[in-house]
Amino acid sequence: MFMQKTGVSPKSALQSPASLKKPCPKPVPRKINGKANVLDILASRGILTGMELDAAADEANSCKVELEEILLEKHGVTKTDLGAALSELYRCPYMGYDERIAIDPVLLRNLSVDYLRNHAWIPIKRNGSQLDVLINNPHDVEKGVDIRRAFPGMTIRFSVGCRHDIDLYLRSVVTGAHDGASSVKSRETTKDVRGGRVSQGDAQPVEENDTDMVRLANRVIADAYRLGASDVHIEPYSDKKDTAVRFRVDGSCFTYMKIPAAYRRPVVSRLKIMANLDIAEHRKPQDGKIRHDLGREQELELRVATLPTSGGNEDIVLRLLTPKEIMPLDAMEFSPEVLQGVKNLAEHPYGLFLCVGPTGSGKTTTLHAILRHINTEERKIWTAEDPIEITQEGLRQVQVHPKIGFTFAAAMRAFLRADPDVIMIGEMRDKETADTAIEASLTGHLVLSTLHTNSAVETVTRLLDMGCDAFNFADTMLGVLAMRLCKRLCPHCREPYRPTRQEYEELVRDYGVSYWESLNVPDVADCTLYRGQGCDACNRSGFKGRVAIQELLIGSEQVKGLIQSKARPAEILNVAMREGMNTLLQNGIQKVLQGITTYRQVRAVAKK
């Protein structure tokens, strides 16, 4: 965030104020009419015309209004352009207001807020003997003297910002009100640094129920929901390092904000209180849930997991169980063959249908889409889930509680006494659940479930290795749908390009030379692929959202025979592909050729 030092060493910072009066060497920007300031830089870049330059300067002088406010509000100057001009003028980085930046209140404990507001500077972050300061004029010598007097022995790094943004930081750190509220807490006997007196009260430790902590925790949850995050990671560190808050969006993590070390334990305790966990227990993991009110009669459920980490710290991971609408099968971007195959299998009166893949690959969403397809008044449908993430009318949904012995297997046995037509089990975690599901499908029920395996064929091996009877499983198996989620190219910045010969040959080789001809893809000279340039809509990543890739193994007579004979996975795969199955990698390459994703993203989630 900060890149340029002022060059003031701890030794020089202890010199007398008179020795510090020597001004910093100022830059020599391009001049217009002999005057050098931010207006001249904006004009030289073609952002302001000569008339607009004079009008802005006159208005700022006559109305006693900050020049930056006039430029932003009345002359259409963007913050990006204004920041670049200020950075060029003062030869230091520009910094605007960012609500994700939490300022350590300890830095302000001996400073008057009114003084800081009037003189437009604020300490942002301390790292050892280095202090980062945001100021509206880094070349103001008197302010520099005050800063070094308030923080003796520190190496100061300046960033330039607008007075309005500095005021927002002051309000947020004093009141915890990131919405710009105008009220501030009073501080006893506090005077500015020029008067030589500071606050007489010692800084109080931050507690989990402080307004700052409540607002910080609520804001992290609200922003995670707004950005579409699936998980939030709170990662404290020792040695007074900032605590990292990372969001997982579209399958990838990124650092959302840094929390000062003073907030490390309070923010963890605050989240544990919200989840009804024991805040005095730091040695063992804990699990809980948070029900968070988002306003407008909207509630968000979060699954909370705490883990003790090195240095006596605790990490917290929040899984956002956002209310999801039931997707229809036709909207899930299945290939036509897979879509028709899934519909046919779902309409069977009995049998076992499995949806497999890693955590977060869309298995539960797919099963609920299948249930929606067959959810009619004539069918009685029971589901056992942990947790219940999606609800739909017509289903009787049950939450399992393993801690009290109400497991998936126990729920299955209870369902069999409750006149079911269709049973959906959240996950086959053990042999008991798998055997009960096979038994239910053998007795005339349609059973849907999920399993964590890498491919459709490997699911067969996994169940047989668990000890399931090969003949019973072969008799009941309708099909296995394996899934992955790939990052989708951003529709706003997607651009076509011609692949190189090497890229083209890699696609052909991994798809299978004997199968490639059926795609009717042009040669490399006429082939078109797509890539993302990066824009504001996708946060410069080139990707926005995700798309599913699938493979469907149908339990044909030949496949069932191989299962009964416990054939090797490679033999089952060869037979399935001859019968028309596309692998995950092949389905992903098809979506690459359609311009939906990139081959690199497909290879990241689907192995050959």
Image (cartoon, helix red, strand yellow):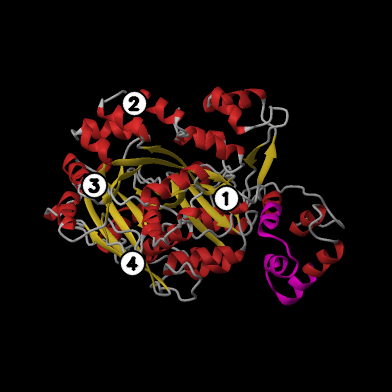
Q: Residue 581 appears at what percent x and percent y?
A: 45, 34
Secondary element under disc 3, as helix, strand or loop, is: helix
Taking 196 as reference, is 17 above or below it?
Answer: above
| Residue type for callout 4 | Glu
Instruction: State the image quarter where residue 5 is shown.
Output: top right
User: Disc number at residue 441?
Assistant: 3
Taking 141 as reference, is 432 above or below it?
Answer: above
- Stretch in magenta: 57-85
The Cα–Cα distance between marks 3 and 1, rounded to whole angstroms, is: 47 Å
Secondary element under disc 2, as helix, strand or loop, is: helix
Asked if residue 140 is among those painted magenta in the image, a careful observer would answer: no
**Quick check: 146 left or right of 289?**
right
| Residue 201 seen in the current view | no
Please report whichever mark, 2 or 4, sits nearer to the chain's N-terminal start: 4
User: Disc number at residue 377?
Assistant: 4
Q: In this figure, which residue is indicated by the disc labeled 1?
A: 539
Task: Give yes or no for contact between labels 3 and 1 (Cβ–Cβ under 8 Å).
Answer: no
Please report whichever mark, 4 or 3, sits nearer to the chain's N-terminal start: 4
The Cα–Cα distance between marks 4 and 1, rounded to whole angstroms, is: 45 Å
Please report whichever mark, 3 or 2, sits nearer to the chain's N-terminal start: 3
The Cα–Cα distance between marks 3 and 2, rounded to whole angstroms, is: 24 Å
| Residue 576 seen in the current view | yes
| Residue type for callout 3 | Ser
The Cα–Cα distance between marks 2 and 4, rounded to whole angstroms, is: 40 Å
Task: Give yes or no for contact between labels 1 and 2 (Cβ–Cβ under 8 Å).
Answer: no
Asked if residue 63 is among those painted magenta in the image, a careful observer would answer: yes
The residue drawn where x is 19% and y is 34% is 469
